[in-house]
Amino acid sequence: MAFYAIGDVHGCLGELQRLLEVIRFDESRDRLWFVGDLINRGPESLGVLSLVRGLGERAVSLLGNHEMRALALLNGRTVNSRHRTYMGYLLECSEREEIAHWLTTLPVMARDDATGYAMVHAGIHPSWSIDAAWRRAVGLAAFCASPQGLAPHVEVGSPPPPVEPDPSQPLLRLWYHAMSFTSIRLCNRQGMALWPGQASQYGLEKSYLWPPDDSPFRPWFEILPRPLSHKLLYGHWAAAGLTLRQDTIGLDSGCVYGGKLTALRLDSEAPFEERLFQVTCGRYADKDD
Ligand SMILES: [Mn+2]
């Protein structure tokens, strides 16, 4: 049995199929973790969904910000026109209902105590330990799977409050958790997260660019207190690229933007270079959020 984590795929079906050939993936024995953002921007999002859904329990895929956007769209929420344009395939597809349901089953965090890895799409708030993040992820997953579900509360484009709401505001708190897991990149040392769209208010050009050294905002994984109980895998930050640290590992290597699609073998203690596998990708989109 082999166990791999794969970075943001963004509808690049051909690249994903080539990567699975490179790692000689055997769906009768091996396991895959996908960091989220399987869909959008690339040419074959429906094909990627079909492949991953077809793997059943051999694969765990997380809710990324693009899956949140898709949830919003499929549930009639307001989505900005640019995002709506590149998600048109979802509205036209015959499996729309099944996909909408499948999206509600996606967790925001995965954890494997045997190998000592955990995974989130964007990151965790630096005031949370891995255990504290896990408790929030379990609560969010239960809410997503409930008849009420997350979709009615998805306000794509509207940032959550600057600090975590307390339990007396349960929906706002869940929204804050959802945004933290799927979208966080920068925080200041007081623990205030910078949400998408807020960069210019704080003198930063774009929230996905690496902040200058003198900025009070730092990547969440620089602020996160150590030691961590698990090595934490994440994606989402294509502009930062593959970011290999001992305890936080960024796997979004810019597939869809002409970069690479990356797999890391997790059931191995070998140095990164011996268990990292990549394929080159077409350039189907320009970088933005
Ligand atoms: Mn993302």
Image: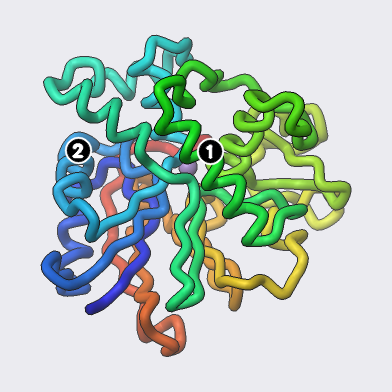
Q: Residue drawn at (39%, 34%), measured in percent from left and top?
A: 67
Circle 2 residue:
44
x, y percentage for residue 37?
39, 43
Compared to 70, does 17 lie above or below? Answer: below
Circle 1 residue:
140
x, y percentage for residue 73?
38, 17
Q: Residue drawn at (76%, 36%), measured in percent from left and top?
A: 164
Left or right position of 271 against 52? right
x, y percentage for residue 199?
72, 33
Compared to 162, does 35 lie above or below? Answer: below
Q: Nearer the viewer, residue 190 or 286?
A: 190
Left or right position of 160 against 155? right
Compared to 142, does 26 lie above or below? Answer: below
Residue 280 visible to the viewer? yes
x, y percentage for residue 163?
79, 35
- Density class for disc 2 (Cα within 10 Å; few <14, some 14-19, many ≥20) is some
Compared to 62, does 261 lie above or below? Answer: below
Q: Nearer the viewer, residue 49 or 178?
A: 178
Q: Amino acid at mark 2?
A: Glu
Left or right position of 29 against 113? left
Q: Which mark is residue 191?
A: none
Which structural element holds mark 1?
helix
The quarter of the displayed image where residue 200 is located: top right
Which structural element holds mark 2?
loop
Q: Amino acid at mark 1?
A: Leu
Q: Say which of marks 2 and 1 sits in front.
A: 1
Mark sitting earlier along the chain (2/1):
2
The quarter of the displayed image where residue 222 is located: bottom right
